[in-house]
């Protein structure tokens, strides 16, 4: 009897510890609707833990697990998402896309070609359906959401090329009866890794002299803009995260080479490379309030590890780090909308990008939302809907209506 009671007590203690871990939300000061976010974060932690456990046991890899659980979003889609829209899943030059078009709109409409986020190895048109459909309905535009190939099965530049292929096709053929798009009014947009693709593709078109039509706007939602300096203040500060991920794992997956954790100390760079590229990642363009502790680059005089420098060399490719281009190139970019959040390691590079764009005459609107986390913009409908996400979308819709 005593032994049974002891076992029950141990089970209860373990259960309580697990529940406490799942419900815990460190660094969440100032975030509203926290109970709803706690529930969301708990589900993400469970997903991550299942993935890591499956990987350790040799059952599966964490990427496959995350994707499978993420695929449940198709079954959980809120009925409000696609209200008032015609939805078509089709192929454009063999690339899967989802096209959302407002109903009863027969004329040629403006369009957004959207690239979803997910650290280059997860995410889909389903995980981002609330956001893309919301933009189509509220902004009265066609949204072409690209279901591009994912790493590690398809490392860089496969996904980027899929997104470029679709965008080029829309710009050249969007005014057909099939699409009914005004090809003079096309924007590229994306969040996180998709924001990286949008920035790179906008630069591709801006640099071309042969393209008859080019994107009119780029809309970048907490984008990945550089992998040069992994010691920006926003990387060094502890943030609230609703899904844990690491730079070394993400880049190992995306590049198809081994990138270790010492990248967090900028060990993937030589001193010569740091001197060459530092002018593009200018800390003085980060707001002073974010530079109270870390005021200047920390390791620019320290030589990196030769093996990591070789394995992570793609980090300095402008088609991976679109911030690492000269001012002349940046000046060619179209009008830009930037969205950032306070709880995000990517925060500071977007402020630097904004500063450099403005310095080079590119019209920029930048909306920053301090007390919310990376990945929050898509929670518009359903049980995890957030008021701030609706505000973010309303602000984007206002910009689109005024500029596209």
Image (cartoon, helix red, strand yellow):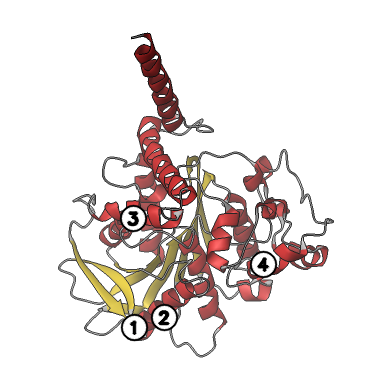
Task: Say which residue label 3 marks.
Answer: 68
Q: Are marks 3 and 4 in contact (CB under 8 Å)?
A: no
**Picture residue at 39% right of the left edge, 45% below the top:** 47
Q: Which of the two marks, 3 or 2, is nearer to us in this view?
A: 3
Which quadrant would residue 183 be assigned to in this image? bottom left
Which quadrant would residue 171 be assigned to in this image? bottom left
**Picture residue at 31% right of the left edge, 81% below the top:** 174
Front in this rendered view, residue 163 or 215: 163
**Circle 4 residues within 10 Å: few <14, some 14–19, many ≥20:** some
Q: Are marks 1 and 2 in contact (CB under 8 Å)?
A: yes
Give the mark nearest the N terminus, 3 or 2: 3
**Circle 2 residues within 10 Å: few <14, some 14–19, many ≥20:** some
Task: Say which residue label 2 marks.
Answer: 165
Task: Say which residue label 4 marks.
Answer: 311
Horizontal and vertical percent for residue 276?
78, 68
**Picture residue at 39% right of the left edge, 36% below the top:** 42
Furthest residue to the top?
A: 2
Task: Say which residue label 1 marks.
Answer: 93
SS of the residue under disc 2: helix
Horizontal and vertical percent for residue 70?
34, 53
Q: CA distance from mark 1 to mark 2?
A: 7 Å
Give the mark nearest the N terminus, 1 or 2: 1
Give the mark nearest the N terminus, 1 or 3: 3
SS of the residue under disc 4: helix
Horizontal and vertical percent for residue 114?
38, 66
């Amino acid at each position: 009897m005593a032994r049974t009671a002891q076992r029950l007590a141990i089970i209860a203690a373990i259960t309580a510890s697990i529940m406490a871990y799942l419900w815990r939300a460190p660094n969440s000061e100032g975030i509203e609707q926290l109970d709803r976010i706690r529930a969301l974060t708990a589900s993400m932690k469970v997903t991550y833990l299942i993935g890591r456990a499956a990987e350790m046991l040799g059952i599966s890899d964490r990427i496959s697990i995350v994707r499978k659980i993420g695929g449940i979003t198709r079954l959980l889609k809120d009925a409000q998402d696609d209200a008032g829209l015609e939805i078509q899943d089709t192929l454009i030059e063999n690339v899967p896309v989802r096209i959302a078009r407002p109903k009863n709109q027969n004329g040629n409409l403006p369009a957004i070609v959207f690239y979803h986020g997910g650290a280059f190895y997860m995410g889909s048109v389903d995980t981002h359906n609330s956001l893309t459909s919301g933009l189509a309905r509220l902004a009265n535009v066609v949204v072409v959401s690209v279901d591009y190939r994912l790493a590690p099965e398809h490392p860089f530049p496969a996904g980027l090329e899929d997104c470029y292929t679709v965008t080029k096709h829309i710009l050249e053929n969007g005014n057909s009866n099939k699409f009914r798009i005004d090809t003079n009014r096309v924007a590229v947009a994306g969040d996180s890794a998709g924001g990286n693709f949008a920035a790179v593709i906008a630069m591709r078109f801006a640099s071309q002299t042969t393209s008859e039509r080019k994107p009119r706007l780029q809309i970048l939602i907490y984008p990945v803009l550089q992998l040069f300096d992994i010691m920006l203040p926003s990387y060094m500060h502890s943030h609230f995260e609703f899904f844990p991920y690491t730079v070394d794992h993400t880049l190992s997956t995306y590049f198809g080479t081994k990138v270790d954790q010492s990248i967090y100390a900028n060990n993937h760079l030589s001193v010569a490379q740091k001197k060459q590229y530092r002018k593009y990642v200018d800390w003085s363009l980060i707001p002073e309030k974010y530079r109270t502790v870390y005021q200047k680059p920390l390791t620019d005089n320290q030589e990196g590890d030769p093996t990591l420098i070789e394995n992570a060399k793609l980090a300095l490719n402008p088609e991976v780090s679109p911030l690492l281009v000269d001012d002349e190139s940046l000046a060619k970019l179209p009008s830009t909308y930037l969205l950032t959040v306070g709880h995000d390691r990517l925060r500071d590079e977007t402020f630097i990008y904004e500063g450099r764009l403005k310095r080079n005459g590119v019209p920029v609107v930048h909306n920053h939302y301090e007390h919310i986390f990376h990945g929050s913009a898509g929670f518009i409908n359903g049980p995890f809907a957030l008021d701030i996400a609706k505000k973010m979308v309303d602000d984007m819709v206002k910009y689109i209506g005024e500029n596209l």
